[in-house]
Image: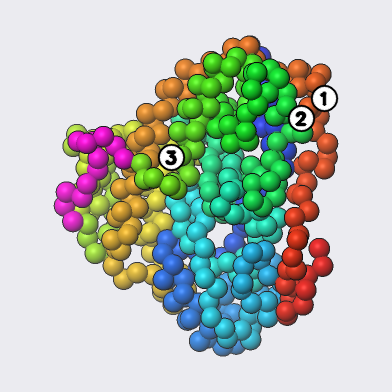
């Protein structure tokens, strides 16, 4: 990772992007799945159950039971009546980040979620970017900061979520007040919020007290870091044009994957991903070895789709055979990890010159940030439905 003279010279990420929240915590597994059809089938099975059977299927916690009265999730159209007497259709599933590089589907119904973090749902739109801190693990080379275009759920070693914008529509960047102006003065041009996030992803590192972000006043170095960071953002977000490896290095299905795969292993000699008798190659060893939080991404991605579920539970309602769409997603994850691994040496070589230190930001009045900047903005410009169809007062 980039280096500066003293560990405490670089400002903390918590000061540069001051508003953060814990990721949503479901409390039960069945409202999320790698495919949307399973979620609708689970909901239908849940609706057919009554009384004690419905309660058992639900998965009661201290935060949620089928009798809990909760508000509607911001921006969603799920019901607000108590689930014990619900009979309506399933809310349309939405895309979420279930784990590192693993986009899944979620039933966006507040009644199913122990800790939904409504403040994050209010700002989740097509302009938003979510930076997700990762717990650093000794001897692991994985990234300490991920970025997603969809709302991340609590999973693995993921930590605080820092939205790039405090309001919907890409308004009011979640940056220390005055930071953009100070960077503009020192660099000779004003960066936009995505530039700052791109730089942050390229250089963020784990320090003694959390993630820090070495800043620079060198315009050429800044442009280089932003260009590298934007490439990282594009690969992490997985939206827009699909990434591809050069011809000859693109992974393909060489032997058909089984209908019900059980095991995945890596053949380093052949650079092949073996899924039972199925085979995908070439798969670079860097893609197989890519870790986040000390866990191999590809192993975790595969386990989510194949681990056994307890019979009779809603989790057990899943595709009977491996969907073709999952194979396409797997090929894309392999591609993304391989391309990210190629960029890691560039990140390691990015040494910050002419640093903008935390002391300089304090002298300029950018730090400390006002406490209001650490709290969510008031973005309520419409009524949100409360329990039992009542309007929520916020």
In the rendered structure, the answer to whether residue 317 lies left or right of residue 221 reads: left
Instruction: Please tell me which of labels 2 and 1 falls first in the chain.
Output: 2
Viewer-proximal residue among 262 and 16? 16
Query: How far is the residue under mark 2 from the one under mark 1?
Result: 8 Å
Given this view, does label 2 or label 1 mark the residue nearer the observer? 2
Q: Mark 2: which secondary structure?
A: loop
- The residue sitting at 70% across, 36% down in the picture is 175
Query: How far is the residue under mark 3 from the one under mark 1?
Result: 35 Å
In the rendered structure, the answer to whether residue 165 lies left or right of residue 393 reads: left
Residue pointed to by mark 1: 365
Q: Please tell me how crowded label 1 is: few (under 14), some (14-19), or many (20+) other residues with Cα within 10 Å.
A: some
Residue range highlighted in magenta: 244-256
Q: Mark 3: which secondary structure?
A: helix
Report if the CB atoms under discs 2 and 1 are less than 8 Å apart.
yes
Query: How far is the residue under mark 3 from the one under mark 2?
Result: 29 Å
Residue 210, horizontal then vertical, whole percent? 65, 31
Residue pointed to by mark 3: 235
Query: In the orientation shown, which residue stands out farthest toward the front?
Result: 189
Visual colour scheme:
rainbow
- The residue sitting at 46% across, 30% down in the picture is 141
**Quarter of image, res 78:** bottom right
In the picture, the disc for residue 178 is: 2
The question of residue 246 being in magenta is answered with yes
Residue 318, horizontal then vertical, whole percent? 39, 70
Residue 117, horizontal then vertical, whole percent? 68, 57
């Amino acid at each position: 990772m980039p280096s500066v003279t003293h560990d405490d010279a670089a400002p903390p990420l918590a000061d540069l992007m001051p508003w953060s929240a814990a990721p949503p915590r479901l409390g039960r597994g069945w409202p999320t799945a790698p495919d949307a059809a399973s979620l609708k089938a689970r909901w239908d099975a849940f609706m057919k159950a009554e009384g004690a059977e419905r309660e058992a299927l639900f998965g009661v916690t201290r935060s949620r039971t089928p009798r809990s009265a909760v508000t509607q999730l911001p921006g969603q159209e799920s019901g607000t009546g108590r689930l014990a007497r619900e009979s309506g259709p399933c809310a349309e599933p939405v895309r979420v980040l279930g784990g590192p590089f693993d986009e899944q589907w979620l039933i966006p119904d507040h009644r199913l979620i122990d800790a939904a973090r409504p403040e994050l749902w209010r700002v989740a739109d097509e302009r938003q970017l979510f930076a997700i801190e990762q717990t650093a693990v000794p001897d692991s080379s994985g990234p300490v900061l991920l970025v997603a275009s969809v709302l991340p759920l609590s999973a693995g070693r993921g930590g605080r979520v820092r939205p790039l914008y405090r309001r919907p529509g890409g308004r009011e960047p979640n940056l220390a007040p005055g930071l953009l102006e100070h960077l503009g003065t020192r660099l000779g041009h004003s960066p936009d919020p995505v530039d700052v996030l791109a730089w942050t992803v390229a250089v963020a590192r784990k320090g003694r007290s959390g993630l820090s972000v070495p800043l620079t006043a060198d315009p050429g170095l800044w442009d280089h870091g932003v260009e590298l960071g934007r490439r990282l953002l594009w690969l992490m977000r997985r939206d827009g044009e699909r990434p591809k490896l050069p011809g000859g290095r693109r992974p393909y299905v060489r032997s058909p994957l089984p209908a019900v795969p059980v095991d995945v292993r890596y053949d380093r000699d052949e650079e092949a991903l073996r899924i039972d008798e199925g085979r995908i190659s070439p798969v670079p060893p860097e893609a197989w070895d890519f870790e986040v939080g000390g866990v191999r991404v590809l192993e975790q991605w595969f386990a989510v789709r194949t681990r056994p579920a307890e019979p009779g539970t809603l989790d057990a309602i899943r595709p009977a055979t491996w969907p073709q769409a999952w194979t396409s997603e797997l090929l894309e994850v392999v591609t993304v990890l391989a391309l990210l691994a190629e960029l890691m040496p560039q990140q390691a070589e990015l040494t910050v010159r002419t640093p903008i230190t935390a002391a300089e930001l304090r002298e300029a009045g950018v730090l400390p940030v006002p406490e209001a900047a650490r709290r969510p903005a008031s973005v309520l410009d419409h009524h949100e439905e409360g329990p039992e169809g009542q309007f929520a007062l916020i």
